[in-house]
Image (cartoon, rainbow, N blue to C red):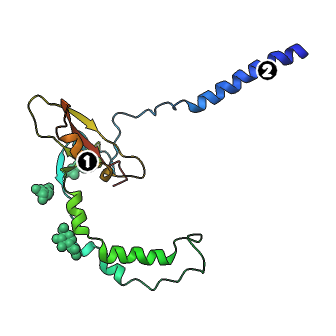
Amino acid sequence: MGLKFLLAIPVLIFAIGYKLNSLFEPPPLPKLEEDTWWGLGPRNDTMYEKLILEPFNITVHEQYLVGWRLATHRPLTPPLEGIQQQYGMNTNLLRDIVNYWGSTYNWTERQEYLNQYPQYHVFVQGLGIHVVHVNPKIELGIKIVPLLLLHGWPGCVREFFELIPKLTTPQEGRKYMFEVIIPHIPGEE
Ligand SMILES: *[C@@H]1O[C@H](CO)[C@@H](O)[C@H](O)[C@H]1NC(C)=O
Ligand SMILES: *[C@@H]1O[C@H](CO)[C@@H](O)[C@H](O)[C@H]1NC(C)=O
Ligand SMILES: *[C@@H]1O[C@H](CO)[C@@H](O)[C@H](O)[C@H]1NC(C)=O
């Protein structure tokens, strides 16, 4: 009885160790069907076969900008006394944000900033993807290496804007530059 009990301990420790170890292992990769159609509606073979990069710029027309809507919002209910964000957004903070978006934020400037790098719209197996693609200027003796940069969640291609010039211009002591391809993860645009 006592011996069996003693033998059971190492077995138990091994089993627990094995289970714990499996928690830190990466899960198996999901299997993707190679010819999945990701588009809306039934599969369209013409669209499936095509891989067209359409040049794209962000252009939000003035009439869709919400400045006037922000200026004419209903009066905000004052927050409870001594309250921060316990019951949702504090309306004192919300008022500052509304004022900022309505009068200080300059969409035209932002739009120019966001359009500074070449962007494209591409369909991959029916799924529309927005991608920033910057090709460096070819320089003698410098190798160009393609580099795919992917943002996380929540996130967007904007996170890489400061990095792009460092990757696509010659740097001292480096014999390579990058051609950067930065897609927006679908659903995050
Ligand atoms: C497939 O999509 C293309 C481009 O949108 C369209 O011109 C064509 O009519 C579609 N074909 C079918 C079978 O729906
Ligand atoms: C995007 O904007 C740039 C700079 O103004 C311009 O050169 C380019 O032709 C535009 N592309 C498209 C697709 O509108
Ligand atoms: C917004 O930015 C654009 C482009 O930089 C500039 O021409 C315009 O004067 C700015 N508008 C305001 C209200 O500052």
Residue identified by numbered label 2: 9
Classify residue 14 by image quadrant. Answer: top right
Q: Is residue 67 left or right of residue 173?
A: right
Point out residue 66 in the picture as x, y percentages from the top left corner: 31, 75
Point out residue 113 in the picture as x, y percentages from the top left corner: 22, 59
Q: Is residue 65 left or right of residue 20?
A: left
Residue identified by numbered label 1: 131
Provide the secondary structure element on which disc 2 rests.
helix
Which kind of residue does numbered mark 2 sit on? Ile
Query: Relative to residue 97, is residue 32 depicted above or below?
Result: above
Q: Is residue 10 left or right of residue 184?
A: right
Q: In this rendering, does residue 44 appear at all?
A: no
Query: Relative to residue 87, is residue 122 depicted above or below?
Result: above
Quarter, ligand 2: bottom left
Mark 2 and ligand 1: say if the CB distance to the nearest ligand atom is below 8 Å: no
Q: Nearer the viewer, residue 24 or 128?
A: 24
Q: In this rendering, does residue 63 appear at all?
A: yes
Q: Earlier in the sequence, mark 2 or mark 1?
A: 2
Q: Residue at x 60, y 81 (%)?
A: 81
Label 2 and label 1: CA atoms lie apart by 56 Å
